[in-house]
Amino acid sequence: TTGYTTLDGGFVNTASTSSAITYIDGDAGILRYRGYPIEQLAEKSSFLEVSYLLIHGELPTTDQLADFTHRIQRHTLLHEDLKRFFDGFPRNAHPMPVVSSAVNALSAYYQDSLDPNDPEQVEVSTIRLLAKLPTIAAYAYKKSVGQPFLYPDNSKTLVENFLRMTFGFPAEPYEADPEVVKALDMLLILHADHEQNCSTSTVRLVGSSNANLFTSISGGINALWGPLHGGANQAVLEMLDDIKGQGLDVNEFIRKVKNKEDGVKLMGFGHRVYRNYDPRAAIVKKTAHDILGKLGAQDELLDIAMKLEEAALTDDYFVDRKLYPNVDFYTGLIYRAMGFPTRMFTVMFALGRLPGWIAHWREMHEDPTTKIGRPRQIYTGHTERNYTEVSAR
Ligand code: SDX
């Protein structure tokens, strides 16, 4: 059940795949990108530098980072026809299907960088995705609020550009708050990769058929949307809003969760791998206090979140099941303080996870032993039986 032997005596592992990109120790609460602890990267690195590290395996030199940054800045524009693509969506569409559709459409507009076996085309599609996803995400937001799209300003950093295209207006200058830029850059680092999670496994499985990078990433964005995965950051805010709106006592809500009333879960808690505090959640929790304080956005929902965490961490139901806050528990509060609507939270997750998805897709093509084999199954259906005419059924 862990795989199958091939006719030439080889063995295809279908239970889990190997990778040299990210290491997680779920019991100890350890997360490292290419060997570097997440705590050090969050404190000292930048999202673009971490993107380079994940994709190329080493921290870049000054020249390598400058070249990487310059190449990305030159690809931030979307094809003019692709900008009109957004007109076809209803204004009230959730931004995730808009973003995943636009990313998939890159396969139609940039047909000169689709071959997964051509290293140059792989590098061009990598740079195009890193450069254009912030533009696509900002346009999905502008479409949802009926405001004009802004062209990228390549004199700005990737995060500054994204914030300007999201919250800026053609009629007036926009300068992003440096505190917001710094906090968002760090949040993107925290989301940049996480081993073989649902969406990354989707990117690898789609890519394993030699489908191009754009369409593989589009598949990952779709998988991320699920509320049990990346959609959880939106679900946490909706949960906190419900508790506040209904005037629910925190302990009353915890009781409902423990009794599994209406299938309610403590969103932002629990993890398939971490059986300890998610190291990213600890960093995000501190940032939530810092950024909310700096922005003067005293958020009643933060108080509710902290009371929920305090109640859950001392309750046997959660302790026995090793349920701790995960990366999604506090991030939504920060995105909200930055001005993003709840439905954009999972788009923010995708922005952060993009370099990790790309790194895994490239690793699979560079080292086929890391390829997810065709998953097999244990058949539990009928044994052979003969067809019966409808008159005899
Ligand atoms: C992400 O894989 C990754 O790395 C993902 C991610 C990444 O960076 O890519 O880290 C990002 O997806 C984080 C997870 C975000 N999702 C949520 O916050 C949604 C809420 N969490 C759960 O749905 C759940 O915890 C999962 C899906 C995340 C993990 O589920 P598990 O570990 O498979 O646990 P399970 O579903 O088998 O449940 C075990 C028990 C059950 O109770 P019993 O049947 O034993 O009585 O724990 C309970 C569950 O009901 N449980 C919860 C719970 N999570 C599990 N009970 C209440 N609230 C919860 N959140």
Image: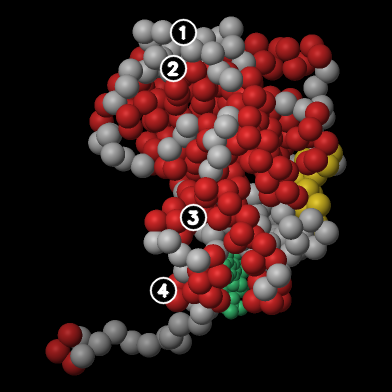
**Residue tagged 3:** 240
Disc 1 to disc 4: CB gap under 8 Å: no
Q: Amino acid at mark 3?
A: Leu
Residue in the picture at 73% in, 30% down:
50
**Residue tagged 2:** 168
Secondary element under disc 4, as helix, strand or loop, is helix
Q: Is mark 2 within 8 Å of ligand 1?
A: no
Q: Which of the 4 quarters of the picture holds residue 203?
A: top right
* 126 is higher (above) or lower (below) than 329: above
Question: Residue 90 in the image: x percent, y percent?
Answer: 25, 36
**Residue tagged 4:** 262
Would you say residue 192 is visible in this rendering? no
Cα distance in 3D space between marks 1 and 2: 7 Å
**Residue tagged 1:** 173
Secondary element under disc 3, as helix, strand or loop, is helix
* Quadrant in which the N terminus is drawn: bottom right
Compare residues 242 and 167 and report the one nearer the observer: 242
Compare residues 126 and 321 and report the one nearer the observer: 321
The mark lying in front, picked from 3 and 2, is 3
Disc 4 to disc 2: CB gap under 8 Å: no
Q: Amino acid at mark 1?
A: Pro
